[in-house]
């Protein structure tokens, strides 16, 4: 789709320049940064070959070939965007998507609290328009309906959008960018608030997406974006959040580059516990009357102190990942050698990166369970672990349950506390392997 951006043409000069500028950084690879167009020469982490992490296989697909793609993250030496090349087209990924946000209780509660907060903060009312990009099954926009605020969802996966439409949430099935923004503006629709939760990472043409938001935004409108914070990913070994559906991984430093490039300014930032540690950034037009909170400068300074403007910091991440893999495998091998039974909990995208990179199949996990009925009866991509309804754990009575969506560990331990009845314990793989006894109070 943007082969001119990822192609090797013109990269030779830049690679020589960057190699001299930063001899400590990793492997040279070629390509251009999807944000700034700078040379893309430095490996962040190479997770080998992996299938698409949301491509769960039905029983009839088990005897067919399964496509694998490189899972190699790079870091830009100019704007420090950590990114994958576009190995897979968005149409391949998002045409029929298995992720339904509403299956996570805590995520829906997070969305409800956000809607109440932002309505008051921006004084939204019946004459406002809230647009959510990648609105999924309406898990968020549904909370604006009782508040009397008009909404429009944009969602490319038709099967997921259908669920929102059936709930009465206006939803357009499309990919967002300048073309769609212009069509909406021509139709008289401009937004007081544009929301992008966990979507920025999934956009291959980042500049077209952000330019579209700017066109759709009213002069004093606000954009809020939530995304996993790269600083947390690096500090806590969250390598399993790297998968083909996530093209980009952001620090606030990189968001500032993005804002500058598109005539936007950062006006505020919240640090959130969601997805292992996320940022919610608030953006306005550079010429808006809105001023910036001190939190923006404070967090930018903290990221600089953490070395996020230094390629050597990024170069050390790959060793952390290998060590995390060895610790998890050592635990699982020891448990199996002792005759323990283990199953998984959850079949999230991140779980599939973890299972494939570590080579964990049914030799370790008898099966996994998920609350999403779409996945029941299917197997995980690559490692082909069967996915059952949650009550399969009660029938199997395993010694250990490996929690794959570790960001939801507190919620899952709370819901599944009864497994203590037969002496079962939970295992979380990230930031490093740890055993949780459900009988002990959780922090
Ligand atoms: Zn860049």
Image (cartoon, grey):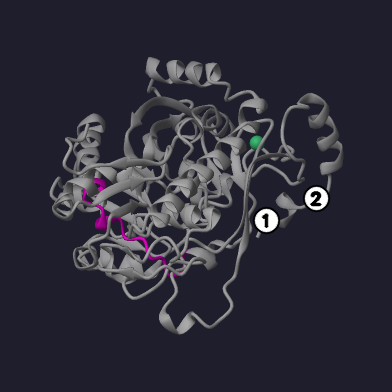
Which residue lies under the disc numbered 1? Answer: 2
Q: Nearer the viewer, mark 2 or mark 1?
A: 2
213 sits to left or right of 343: right
Say which of 385 and 218 sits in front: 385
The answer to whether residue 241 is visible is: no
The quadrant where residue 299 appears: top left
Q: Which mark is residue 31?
A: none
Report if residue 98 lies within the magenta region: yes
What quarter of the picture does the N terminus occupy? bottom right
Q: Which mark is residue 8?
A: 2
Say which of 299 and 56 sits in front: 56
Report if residue 88 lies within the magenta region: no
What quarter of the picture does the C terminus occupy? top left
Residue at coordinates 53% horizontally, 16% vertically from top-left? 305
Ligand 1, image quadrant it occupies? top right
Please tell me whether residue 381 is drawn above or below residue 82 in the rendered image.
below
Q: How dense is the environment of label 2, judged by Cα within 10 Å: few (below 14), some, or many (20 and up)?
A: some
Please tell me whether residue 391 is drawn above or below residue 433 in the rendered image.
below
What segment is highlighted magenta in the picture? 94-107
Q: How dense is the environment of label 1, judged by Cα within 10 Å: few (below 14), some, or many (20 and up)?
A: few
84 sits to left or right of 188: right
- x and y percentages locating residue 83 in the rendered image: 60, 44
Q: Secondary structure at mark 1?
A: loop
């Amino acid at each position: 789709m943007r082969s001119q951006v990822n192609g090797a043409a013109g990269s030779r000069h830049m690679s020589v320049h960057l190699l001299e500028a930063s001899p400590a950084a990793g492997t040279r690879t070629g390509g251009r940064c999807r944000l700034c167009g700078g040379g893309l020469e430095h490996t962040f982490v190479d997770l080998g070959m992996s299938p698409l992490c949301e491509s769960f296989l039905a029983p009839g697909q088990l005897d067919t070939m399964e496509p694998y793609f490189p899972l190699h993250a790079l870091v830009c030496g100019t704007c420090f965007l950590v990114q994958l090349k576009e190995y897979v087209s968005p149409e391949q990924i998002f045409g029929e998507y298995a992720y339904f946000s509403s299956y996570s209780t805590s995520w829906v509660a997070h969305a409800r609290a956000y809607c109440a907060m932002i309505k008051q903060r921006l004084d939204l009312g019946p004459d406002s328009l809230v647009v959510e990009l990648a609105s999924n099954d309406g898990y968020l926009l549904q909370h604006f309906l009782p508040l009397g605020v008009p909404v429009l969802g944009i969602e490319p996966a038709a099967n997921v959008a259908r669920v929102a439409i059936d709930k009465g949430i206006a939803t357009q099935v499309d990919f967002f960018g300048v073309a769609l923004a212009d069509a909406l503006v021509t139709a008289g629709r401009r937004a007081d608030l544009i929301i992008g939760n966990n979507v920025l990472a999934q956009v291959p043409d980042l500049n077209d997406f952000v330019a579209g938001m700017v066109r759709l935004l009213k002069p004093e409108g606000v954009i809020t974006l939530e995304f996993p914070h790269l600083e947390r990913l690096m500090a806590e070994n969250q390598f399993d959040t790297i998968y083909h559906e996530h093209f980009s991984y952001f620090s606030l430093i990189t968001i500032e580059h993005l804002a500058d490039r598109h005539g936007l300014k950062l006006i505020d930032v919240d640090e959130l516990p969601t997805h292992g540690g996320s940022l919610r950034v608030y953006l306005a037009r550079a010429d808006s009357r809105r001023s910036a909170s001190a939190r923006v400068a404070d967090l930018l300074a903290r990221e600089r102190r953490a070395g996020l403007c230094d390629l050597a910091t990024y170069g050390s991440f790959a060793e952390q990942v290998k060590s995390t893999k060895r610790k998890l495998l050592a635990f699982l091998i020891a448990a199996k050698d002792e005759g323990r039974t283990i199953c998984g909990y959850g079949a999230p995208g991140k779980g599939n990166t973890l299972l494939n990179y570590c080579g964990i199949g049914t030799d370790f996990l008898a099966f996994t369970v998920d609350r999403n009925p779409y996945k029941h009866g299917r197997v995980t991509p690559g490692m082909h672990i069967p996915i059952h309804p949650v009550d399969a754990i009660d029938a199997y009575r395993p010694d250990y349950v490996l929690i794959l969506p570790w960001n939801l560990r507190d919620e899952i331990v709370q819901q599944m506390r009864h497994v203590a009845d037969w002496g079962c314990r939970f295992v979380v793989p990230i930031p490093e392997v740890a055993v949780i006894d459900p009988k002990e109070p959780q922090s």
